[in-house]
Every structure is written in structure tokens, then in C-alpha cells.
């Protein structure tokens, strides 16, 4: 992958343009500090960052307590769309807000996508990672 001079804010804005169903995105630290965002006007970036970090913390703890392995992703379904929370490295979190019409293969496969973006050589399509089918 070639180095880029785009800022993280620019990359998130390009994500919103590339996928019209994505309406907002933010990268925050695990401590709840904003790193980058493409949020609608009037949305408090700091408040969103704290809430996203709290969701991550709760999801990681619940996943651990339920013995489901390491946390990978969380999605919340609302009447108008989804909020997706995904690991973005060891110390950051990516949150994406989408419409209800989004094809969830892209956001839910973020870890695969970030190493091989859709449409790039070597991309494997939209196959979802097979989850562990065992019950708790």
C-alpha cells in the first residue's frame, strides 16, 4: 500500500462520499478522545467520542465475560440505520453511522477491508467471516 498524505479527517470524508449509505464516521481513542471525524453539523465530537469509547469498553468486557474471544465489532440497529463500532488498531476505534439500506458486508469486514480495500488487486469480495457457531 502506498503512503498517503491524506489526513484521517479527509479519509473519513472520502468514505462518506464513496459509500452514500454512510452518514457519519469517527475515529476515537480507547480513552474517549476524538482523533478524526466526519460528523454532521451540530453533533458534539467530544461527546460522541466518549460514548463510542464507553460502548467499546462495555462490548469488550461483555465479550470477555461471555467467553466469546476477543472483541472484534459491535453493531447497534436503530429504526433509521446502524451504528457500527470496530477496532481500528490497538488504541483506536472506528465508529460508522449508516442508513438502514447499507450493505453490511463492508463495514463488518473492516479488518479485512483495511488491508485489501474493495476493488483493489487481491480483494476477495464481500464474504463475511464465518462466526463460531457454538452456543454459550
Image (tube, rainbow, N blue to C red):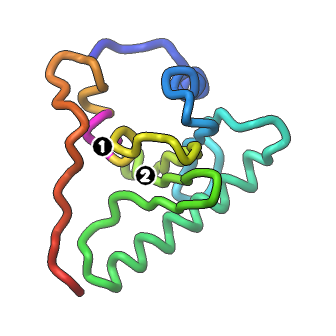
Residue 40 is left or right of residue 102, and the answer is: right
Residue 84 in the magenta stretch? The answer is no
**Displayed quadrant of residue 41:** top right
Label 2: few (<14), some or many (≥20) within 10 Å?
A: many
Residue 122 location (% of width, % of height): 14, 22
Residue 65 location (% of width, % of height): 34, 85
Q: Residue at x 36, y 14 (%)?
A: 3
Q: Nearer the viewer, residue 56 or 76?
A: 76
Report the magenta residues as a range: 109-113
Q: Nearer the viewer, residue 94 or 91?
A: 94
Residue 111 in the magenta stretch? The answer is yes
Figure check: 77 above or below 43? below
Residue for badge 2: 86
Q: Are marks 1 and 2 in contact (CB under 8 Å)?
A: yes
Q: Residue at x 56, y 21 (%)?
A: 17
Q: Residue at x 62, y 57 (%)?
A: 32
Figure check: 17 above or below 37? above
Q: Point out which mark residue 111 bears.
A: 1
Q: Residue at x 63, y 38 (%)?
A: 24
Figure check: 81 above or below 2? below
* Among the two numbered marks 1 and 2 on one chain, the one whose residue lies closer to the N terminus: 2
The N terminus is located in which quarter?
A: top left
Q: Nearer the viewer, residue 79 or 124?
A: 79
Q: Regarding mark 2 in the picture, which secondary structure is present there?
A: strand
Residue 104 location (% of width, % of height): 39, 45
The C terminus is located in which quarter?
A: bottom left
Q: CA distance from mark 1 to mark 2?
A: 8 Å
Q: Regarding mark 1 in the picture, which secondary structure is present there?
A: helix
Amino acid at each position: 500500500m502506498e503512503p498517503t498524505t491524506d489526513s484521517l479527517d479527509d479519509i473519513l470524508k472520502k468514505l462518506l462520499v464513496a459509500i452514500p449509505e454512510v452518514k457519519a464516521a469517527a475515529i476515537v481513542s480507547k480513552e474517549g478522545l476524538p482523533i478524526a471525524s466526519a460528523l454532521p453539523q451540530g453533533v458534539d465530537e467530544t461527546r460522541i467520542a466518549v460514548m463510542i469509547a464507553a460502548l467499546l469498553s462495555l462490548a469488550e468486557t461483555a465479550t470477555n465475560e461471555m467467553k466469546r474471544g476477543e472483541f472484534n465489532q459491535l453493531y447497534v440497529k436503530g429504526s433509521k440505520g446502524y451504528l457500527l463500532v470496530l477496532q481500528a488498531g490497538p488504541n483506536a476505534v472506528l465508529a460508522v453511522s449508516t442508513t438502514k439500506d447499507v450493505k453490511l458486508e463492508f463495514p463488518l469486514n473492516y479488518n479485512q477491508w483495511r488491508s485489501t480495500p474493495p476493488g483493489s488487486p487481491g480483494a476477495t469480495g464481500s464474504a463475511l467471516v464465518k462466526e463460531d457457531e457454538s452456543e454459550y
